[in-house]
Amino acid sequence: MKLVLASKNRKKLEELCALLQKAEPAWEIVTSDAIGFSREIEETGHNFEENALLKAKAIASLGYFALGDDSGLCVDALNGAPGIYSARYAGEHGNDAKNNQKLLQDLAGVAACDRSATFVCAMACAAPDGAYFTVRGECPGKIAAAPAGNGGFGYDPLFIPNGFSRSFAQLTPEEKNAVSHRKKALDALMKQLLPFVASHT
């Protein structure tokens, strides 16, 4: 069975493919580029689930089972920001360095004990007939005073997950994938995916 990933974020696709193929090797995991889908899907939703669903439905309308993902960082001291605007927090979509710099600026003067944050990932699976379901995964942690590590992407150099003293960017891919918000969302998704596909094929 073919499952199309509705994302153009290369780093995110690498993580998703690694996690999906480990969870369900029988699936043929392909990207939207592989099916010739090049349109940018505008993220106009009011939460992570709505944005994930917009992506999944755009691909599913072409006759595929599709997986949409939307994720971001929610910082308690900033009332949940950057949230769904994580990728464009500093005004330029996908500029990790500027986004991290702005986050540190916005948290200037905030004590270490008040820098709690949660990485959130929502996933939506949509079928060609219009049916869908959504799931969510969360990884709690805190924001460091300075970036550390060269791995991962996005806010990974600043995010230290609970139970670790290193940032996501300092963890190995295996360590990160064992506890990440994306792994938790995918675990929830896999519990529903096969029955969902069977009932909408």
Image (spheres, rainbow, N blue to C red):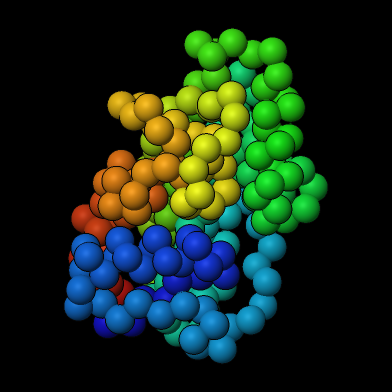
Quarter of the figure with residue 146: top right
Instruction: Give the side of residue 67 with respect to residue 184, left or right.
Output: right
Q: Position of residue 103 (x, y in %)?
A: 68, 32
Picture residue at 68% right of the left edge, 29% below the top: 104
Towards the viewer: 54 or 170: 170
Q: Position of residue 73 (x, y in %)?
A: 55, 38
Residue 174 visible in the snapshot? yes
Q: In the picture shown, does residue 191 fall above or below 110?
A: below
Instruction: Give the side of residue 156 with respect to residue 41, left or right.
Output: left
* Quadrant, the N terminus: bottom left
Picture residue at 45% right of the left edge, 71% below the top: 5
Towards the viewer: 86 or 95: 95
Q: In the picture shown, does residue 70 fall above or below 119?
A: below
Q: Position of residue 162 (x, y in %)?
A: 36, 27
* Quadrant, the C terminus: bottom left
Residue 73 visible in the snapshot? no
Q: Position of residue 123 (x, y in %)?
A: 43, 55
Q: In the picture shown, does residue 78 fall above or below 19?
A: above
